[in-house]
Image (spheres, rainbow, N blue to C red):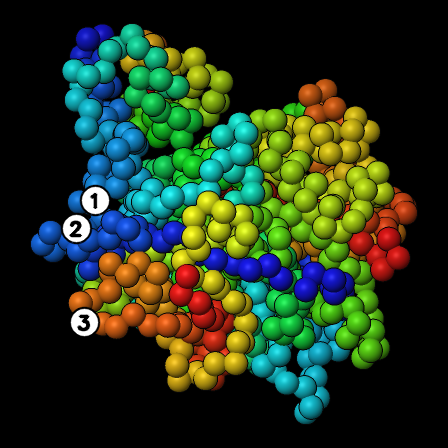
Amino acid sequence: MPDIVEDLKEQVIKALNLRDVTPEDIDPDAPLFGEGLELDSIDALEIVVMLEKRYGIRVEDMDVARQAFRSVNALAEFVTENRESCEQTE
Amino acid sequence: MKDVVITDCACVAEDGFGNRRTWQSWDGAAPGADDLRWSMFSETPFDAFRRLDALCRYALSAVELLTLPPPAAGGRRPDLGLCLGTQYGSLDADIAFIRTANNASGPSPRLFTYTLPSTALGEIAIRHRITGPNLCVLCGPDSGMAALREGTFMVADGTVAGCVCLGCDAVSMPVAGRSVGYAYAFVLERAPAACEREGPLARLIPGDAGCTPARCVAAHDALPALFRYVASSARPAGEPPCESLCLRAAAHPAAPCLLCNLDAG
Amino acid sequence: MRTDRVAITGIGIVSAAGWTPEELWSAIEAERSGLGRLTLFDSPRCGHVPVGQVIGDPAARSGLSRGSRTDHFAVCAARDALEDSGLREPGPAADRRRMGVVLGGTTGGMLSTEAFLQKLLLDEAFDAALLRDHQCCAATEAVAAGLQLRGFRATVSDACASSNAAVAIGCDVLRSGEADVMLAGGADSLTRLTLNGFCSLLNVSHEGARPFDAERSGLSLGEGAGMLVLEREEAAVARGARIYGLVAGYGSTCDANHLTAPMPDGSAAANAMRRALEMAGIAPAAVDYVNAHGTGTVTNDLAEARALRAVFGSRPPAVSSTKRFFGHTLGAAGAMEAVVCVLAMQRQRFPANLGFRTMDAEVGFAPVAHTCDGTIRAIVTNSFGFGGNNCSLVICGREA
């Protein structure tokens, strides 16, 4: 889990072009959207693209995304669960 | 038809930046789009600035330098229009997007929004809460002029009390033999209201005012010429102030000028 | 200025549901969707989403020796519209410098740009000539040159509200006396860019757009062109032209809220409709039909429904989105739907909201389920675009 959290921080910074943000700046429990990093729904879609590219996880329902993208920790949990299910089906 | 006056202007261009009072030449070479810093234009923080594409960066910078008519109750500006004229539009973003769509990373939704030049208007509208009509026109080298023309009509016929008109381009590819980056912005308002607030700077008269084409400034130079005309600080030393300025479309050299700017206020 | 009334004297259309107004109207009567399989290019990332691809060879039909797919669509629809108005050969006395063109578009010659990019990526060669067709003003230039319209010329790129804004500008140019005839419309072709882009926003439907339906799942992209020939009513009457109706009003506002999502309460969209009706001098209660933007996305249709209820009350007039007939054609959508409105008024028939099955309680009303008879004197037609841009037109009969 900690590895995924760190990796996700880096991926989020890269995908969202957060030029002045370092991984240390991101509190893994803080909300990703609305406050804090001031991300919006287009950033959420960028994360969808990133998840598919990095982890092979497809998200097609934004209601699922809204739940999963609450914070970096929530995102890590989502990645762990879905990656496992991907591996099982393969 | 109501009287239309220019109440402020601003530019971020190769020779310098600022509004009609603060214009100054760059300290050294003009910065490229990536080197524009929000702190050059504003004291209000705007973290998202560095994530905008180049067209938005130029456009938002120039508008930030303007003094806009005060908002209505609720902080919105329903009586203000917004017109952008751009020759190359979203060319850079189009190509960057096609690249992302073709490589392994997949299409970027953020980049997709920038493949519409009107996104720059959306960003400006959101920042300054401009809820009046907005319009983005592409007319080759006449684009900036076309925006000025549409804005003048919008104000003259009473659709809105004021309009922000922009000519803006940002292209990193050598479209005109080299890269291009500039934004010129003008605030147009109806005469009585604007005069109460601050003296009008120049009156715009749409249509043929009987001038001879030889005296008109062609469109590709029109916005810089109009800016220098209104912001005397931007005039090169030794250049005498002109009493009037006529602007015509480059694509129609034989046509009468589209905007005559007859009064120096 | 604004006292002259503007008449519609010619129409032209190119769409997945037909190459002429008559073909399109038979599809509307038969409730036959033009959505189908994409064969224009591969779209590995988007799967098999249905699109409104125009069938046939646009280049052969336009007769242009060069130009993009968009240019071909634009020239075909423009030629038909001028022909329809009787101004294709306006006579030796006509001053072609008094005939202008204003078009809306978003992607222009993007398909040609992809060739440019390939060259740039492969051998890093910058060939500016390949970019000639890229800008959306290329279609305007092609129409102006091909049909010898030598007067006012402009191109609007206001996302999906582009061609409604173009019609509004066309009217302004006539009212200010800068031109006597204005061809106003829009054209856009399907491109990899728009398909990939909308797919990345997760709002393309896998089963085809079903506007206002409770189970709607997104939009379907389309392509084509729509054109109107506009003249001052007095001049049109004087030359004995057939007058379809008037463009009586237009209104435009901006949400100033979000770049891609509509403002949930629809308040700015409602204000665009109110501005248009006010200009037309028509009360909301006198509106007989609304051709909705109705893309089929969950958020657009809900916001638009709220806007309609705000303007018209809890029982709005007959409403339909005709997007399932030829897809969402972006910069061409407003003009193509204006042509649908003209046909609806001419035939006194409400066009079906194809794809609608189940009422959405949140939407709060059912659109026109099947093409049917109706009394149509005044119409509002909406186009909303990214950037929060809303543009509404009022089209009405001469006696409305």
Q: Residue at x 73, y 29 (%)?
A: C309
Q: Is C45 drawn above or below residue C99 in the view shown?
A: above
**Residue matched to label 1:** B36
- Secondary structure type for disc 3: loop
Residue A23: % across, % down? 18, 19
Q: CA distance from mark 3 to mark 2?
A: 26 Å
**Residue matched to label 2:** B31
Q: Residue at x 60, y 59 (%)?
A: B2
Picture quadrant where residue B61 is located: top left
**Residue matched to label 3:** B238
Between C268 and C191, the one lying in front of the other is C268
Marks 1 and 2 belong to one chain = yes
Residue C24: % across, % down? 73, 56
Between C87 and C119, the one lying in front of the other is C87
**A85 on left or right of C35:** left
**B22 on left or right of C3:** left
**Label 1 or label 3, whichever comes before in sequence order:** 1
Subunit that carries the residue with mark 1: B
